[in-house]
Image (cartoon, coloured by chain):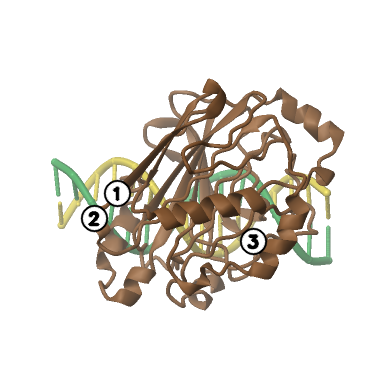
Chain colours: A brown, B green, C yellow
DNA sequence: CGAATTTGACCAGCGC
DNA sequence: GCGCTGGTCAAATTCG
């Protein structure tokens, strides 16, 4: 039903690493900060190989995917973010349109389905609260944005309060004033070709969790293959400049990137475990199939990009 | 008035 | 083959 499906169907593009990091402090108003202060994010990084049973279609679709190299590239990455907050809205700087909500088995809380409102952008996400803990919001991103963060738009939920990048190098740059966010990233293999979701191999997922203007964090998932990783340099720079000051210190943000080449890289599931400094929470990042390069890239990116977005 | 959200119905995959 | 469940559609409603 969405034109984007067909339009985006170019197969997968290498994941693009997008520079997204924290919002420029400048955009954060004092009020926002205060709000953020309210947020209590507890975090622990959980690793899910988002291969959740959850999506039957995906499973099937992925299996249907041709194993040709091309198809492999059509992989889709998913990133699950666990955020502990009062509010379940996770703002990642992009604009989302809610297209559905449904009760999920095993969870008393409904799951909300969102899709990027940018025309042609195939990215979707669903948000739900953990059944065992209503304070934990699980946001799962699917797909990769093929556009920039809509800057200049009025973002309704951007309380840029906590954005931190982490160094995958072993430590998460978690700084935190108290909020911690859990991020799960996993890469799914190619998604359903049928379900009209076109995913791009290189997916960048960013999530800012803001609890009603309370907190936010971002997760970046990137993929190291593909020329497109070229994440637009220009872009990066710009953002870079924007986020230079990104010195937020409230929450812990975990960025993890996991790239699972849609290929049968079964061999390797790299697992990176990191413990956040300050003995906060332990963050475990498991990258489905990741390559060091990816990680390094990731860390680079994460530390230097930021995009103030408001939708 | 346009855009976003809500919500019930429909479709498709998976397990039995 | 049937039922269950997840995911999506689209009309109606609400909001800015």
Count every numbered label the image shows and give the total. Answer: 3
Quadrant housing residue A116: bottom right
Tell me if label 3 and label 2 are in contact, CB under 8 Å. Answer: no
Label 2 neighbour load within 10 Å: few <14, some 14-19, many 20+: few
Is A227 situated above or below A269?
Answer: below
- Residue A194 vs residue A1: left or right? left
Mark 3 element type: loop
Is A43 situated above or below A220?
Answer: above
Quadrant housing residue A148: bottom right
Instruction: Check disc 2 and report the residue beneath it.
Output: A266
Residue nearer the viewer, A274 or A149: A274
Residue nearer the viewer, A297 or A10: A297
Residue A99 visible in the shown view: no
Q: Nearer the viewer, mark 3 or mark 2?
A: 2
Rendered location of residue A11, percent (x, y): 42, 75
Label 1 neighbour load within 10 Å: few <14, some 14-19, many 20+: some
* Protein chain holding label 3: A
- Which residue is found at the position 55% from the left and 74% from the top? A3
Instruction: Check disc 1 and report the residue beneath it.
Output: A269
Mark 2 element type: helix
Q: Quadrant of the C terminus of chain A?
A: bottom right
- Which residue is found at the position 30% from the left and 75% from the top? A69
Mark 1 element type: loop
Rendered location of residue A75, percent (x, y): 38, 64
Label located before the other in sequence (3 or 2): 3
Residue A85 visible in the shown view: yes
* Protein chain holding label 1: A
Query: Between marks 3 and 2, how big is the CA–CA gap?
Result: 34 Å
Query: Between marks 1 and 2, how big is the CA–CA gap?
Result: 7 Å
* Protein chain holding label 2: A
Rendered location of residue C4, percent (x, y): 29, 41
Instruction: Check disc 3 and report the residue beneath it.
Output: A117
């Amino acid at each position: 039903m969405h034109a984007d499906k067909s339009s985006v169907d170019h197969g997968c593009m290498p994941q693009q690493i997008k520079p997204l990091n924290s919002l420029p402090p400048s955009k954060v108003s004092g009020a926002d900060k205060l709000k953020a202060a309210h947020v209590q994010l507890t975090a622990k990084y959980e690793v899910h190989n988002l291969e959740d049973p959850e999506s039957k279609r995906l499973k099937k679709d992925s299996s249907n995917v041709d194993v040709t190299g091309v198809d492999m590239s059509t992989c889709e990455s998913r990133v699950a973010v666990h955020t502990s907050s009062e509010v379940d809205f996770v703002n990642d700087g992009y604009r989302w349109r809610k297209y559905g909500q449904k009760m999920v088995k095993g969870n008393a809380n409904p799951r909300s389905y969102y899709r990027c409102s940018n025309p042609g952008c195939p990215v979707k996400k669903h948000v739900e609260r953990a059944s065992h803990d209503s304070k934990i919001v699980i946001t799962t991103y699917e797909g990769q944005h093929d556009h920039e963060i809509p800057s200049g738009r009025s973002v309704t939920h951007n309380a840029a309060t906590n954005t931190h990048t982490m160094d995958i190098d072993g430590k998460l740059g978690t700084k935190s004033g108290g909020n911690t966010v859990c991020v799960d990233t996993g890469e799914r293999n190619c998604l359903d070709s049928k379900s009209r979701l076109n995913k791009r191999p290189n997916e960048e997922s960013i999530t800012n969790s803001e609890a009603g203007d309370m907190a936010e964090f971002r997760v970046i998932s990137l993929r190291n293959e593909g020329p497109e990783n070229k994440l637009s340099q220009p872009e990066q720079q710009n953002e870079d400049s924007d986020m230079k000051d990104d010195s937020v210190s409230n929450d812990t943000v975990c960025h993890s990137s996991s790239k699972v080449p849609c290929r049968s890289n079964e061999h390797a599931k790299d697992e990176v475990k990191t413990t956040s400094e300050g003995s906060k929470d332990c963050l475990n990042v498991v990258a489905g199939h990741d390559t060091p390069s990816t990680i390094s890239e990731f860390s680079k990116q994460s530390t230097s990009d930021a995009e103030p977005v408001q939708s």
